[in-house]
Amino acid sequence: MTSVLEARALGKRYGRRWALRDCTVDVPAGHVVGLVGPNGAGKTTLLKLAGGQLEPTAGDITVLGGRPGATPAQLARVGFVAQDTPVYAGLTVADHLRLGERLNPRWDADVARERVARLGLGPGQRAGRLSGGQRAQLALTLGLAKRPELLILDEPVAALDPLARREFLQGLMEAVAEHEFSVLLSSHLVSDLERICDYLIVLVDSHVRVAGETERLLATHHRLTGPRRDPGRLPADQHVVSASHTDRQSTYVVRTDAPIHDPAWTVSRLSLEDLVLAHMDGPPAESRRAALEVQR
Ligand SMILES: Nc1ncnc2c1ncn2[C@@H]1O[C@H](COP(=O)(O)OP(=O)(O)OP(=O)(O)O)[C@@H](O)[C@H]1O
């Protein structure tokens, strides 16, 4: 199956600072992909590289098998809704739909009209007078009516109240079920991502910390609690994601494909939020086994 997003050693540098570095990831098509990470981790940078708004400084990126933004045909296959729900304040809802139709060769006018009617947006209303939630819905409508194979959404629900957020995500999921396209969206709200995403990418400090199908990630991450133990004494196939210790007790989050039989450990599953937080908290991979020594 074609990859929706394939990056090899991808990097973007602003001046001397890397916003994204050594990013290697291969996401199969047909997923709703959540991109999560702390402020400044490089999420918007990765999304803009995927949308063709930025050129890489290093490495390669392909989206749906093509170079992002390289040709009009490639541009037509990818929808991009930027972080600040970009609509034109002076234009009406109907103006936006006309503009969308003019600019997008695969424009689906029925989808646009039906969504606008369902949302109760008046065609004559100016976008500048809409609420934040309505503006987000209008931007989503434009993205959906473009009928992309991949829809990229940069923090689409950040400004929305919980109800508007739920409606927005429901609308997105209904559209995905109906038209079967891939979605790549960033958010700080892991509970929202947990509801709608079946694939997750965690970015930390401009690097991909972990990526994979959420079910698989949940099945291969475990919390181990037991008598204090040095990370060097864990089996080699247990990759330490995060660790904390008291004088007597150690708690590890580990990633492993193998079952854990050690009777010294109490083993528990993680929620997706715990899993994300463990990766965001944990030291970089190269220093994880030395983590206990550093803390002493
Ligand atoms: N145009 C720019 N010029 C210089 N530095 C930039 C520019 N855009 C982003 N950066 C820097 O690149 C890094 C990654 O930024 P990016 O916006 O991709 O992060 P993010 O994960 O989307 O953050 P947030 O969650 O806060 O939106 C940050 O350190 C940021 O300051």
Image (cartoon, helix red, strand yellow):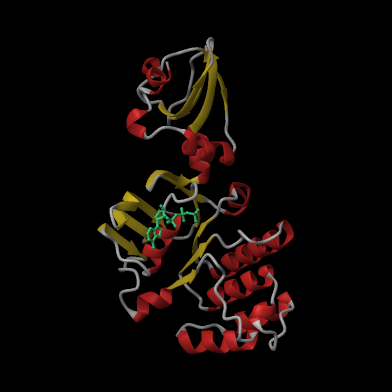
Q: How many marks?
A: 0
Instruction: Give the camera-side residue of 18 and 214.
Output: 18
Tell me if residue 53 can be seen: yes
Residue at the front extreme?
A: 15
- Picture quadrant of residue 59: bottom left
Residue 253 image position (x, y, % from top left): 49, 28
Query: Which residue occupies 64% across, 86% down?
Result: 92
**Left or right of residue 182: residue 115:** right
Q: Is residue 63 left or right of residue 84?
A: left
Residue 265 visible in the current orientation = no
Residue 38 x %, y % = 49, 46
Closer to us: 33 or 132? 132
The spot of residue 120 in percent (x, y) is 74, 78
Pick whichever, 283 or 264, lies toward us: 283
Instruction: Give above or below for 66 relative to 275.
Output: below
Determine the residue located farthest toward the left in the rendered image. Answer: 58
Q: Looking at the rendering, in which quadrant would you find the C terminus?
A: top left
Q: Residue at x 40, y 64 (%)?
A: 48
From the top left corner, tell me how far across and down residue 272 is, in percent. Answer: 57, 41
Q: Is residue 66 above or below residue 264?
A: below
Residue 14 located left or right of residue 187: left
**Residue 60 lies in what quarter of the image?**
bottom left
Q: Is residue 156 left or right of residue 125?
A: left
Position of the N terminus by quadrant: bottom left
Name above or below for residue 94 compared with residue 66: below
| Residue plotted at (51% across, 59% down) | 185
Write down which quadrant ligand 1 falls in: bottom left
